[in-house]
Image: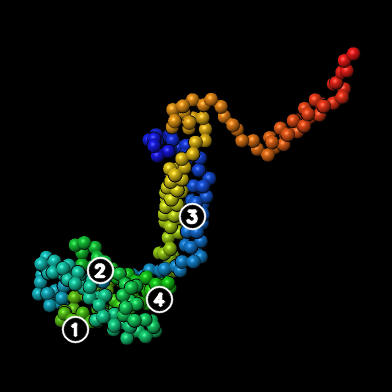
Amino acid sequence: MSAQELDLRDYFQIVRKRLWMIVSIVIVVCLLAGVYSLYIKNPVYEASTKIIVNQTQQVQSTASQLDLNQINTNIQLINTYKEIIKTPAILDVVAKDYPQFNTTAEELLKKVNVSSVNNTQVMTLVVRDNSYQRAAEIVNAISLVFKQEIPSLFNVQNVSILNEAKLNPTVAPGPVEPNVVMNLVIAFIVSLMIGLGIAFLLEYMDDTLKTEEDIEKYLGLPTIAMITRLGQEETKSTETQAQKLSRKAGDLEHVTAAK
């Protein structure tokens, strides 16, 4: 069908022609995605703390009102602090002071994510792990070590922990990964695109003429005769009828002798 342009009706015919193949691909891929998300992929839990960068005690004692310049300076410091948290200056201390984690600074770095809300003095420290209890303990430890180490690094004490991660929450937190619904939606869309692509590719590579309409459409010639292919049942029925006719033709009762 490469020699002719396809219209919308042709596309629908191609999809209808290979609908079972497309549906089969979608079902198989979605089942594989569901099995992977529910039974193979290890669940990942998330725990977080919030840290605020505020004014130093010296500024607080001398200033009678909020110093906007100091706040802006603290906001700018957040970008620096976000990088410091993920450096060996903090993570090496965590790995050393908390041997129960049985992890290295490099492994902690893969678990840690630091973010901040624009134009605020608050940072959010997030740790992901296969156990919520372990994630909460690690994120609390990193926050505490960061608060303790900042005065020696910057000679300031302007970091406070707003809230720690709850080690034993009243409601058991659910895993943030895998997202089964999202994985199934992605699998459905991707498999549908693959199925449609294969269907159109097969139709593009198929240059055989199958119907009278194909001959008239692509060759511009009328059909004079057509040889049909008979199925097994039709073939047996035709052979049976032929045998009956041959028996009747050779039967003696149909033969008369001339006098």
Query: How far apart in space, not on screen, are marks 4 and 3 (Cα)?
Result: 32 Å
Q: Which of marks 2 and 3 is in front?
A: 3
Residue with the mark numbered 3:
30
Amino acid identity at mark 3? Cys
Please, is residue 96 above or below residue 183 in the view?
below
Front-lying residue, 171 or 115? 115
The answer to the question of whether label 4 and label 3 lie on touching residues, with beta carbons closer than 8 A, is no
Which of the two labelled residues, at mark 1 and mark 2, occupies the earlier sequence position? 2
Circle 1 residue? 152
Does residue 109 sit above or below 189 in this rendering?
below
Q: Spot the residue most to the front.
A: 259
Residue at image point 30% right, 69% down:
113
Give the secondary structure at mark 2.
Answer: strand
158 lies left or right of 259 = left
Asked if the residue under mark 4 is in contact with the one under mark 1, i.e. CB atoms within 8 Å, the reply is: no
Residue 82 relative to residue 199: left or right: left
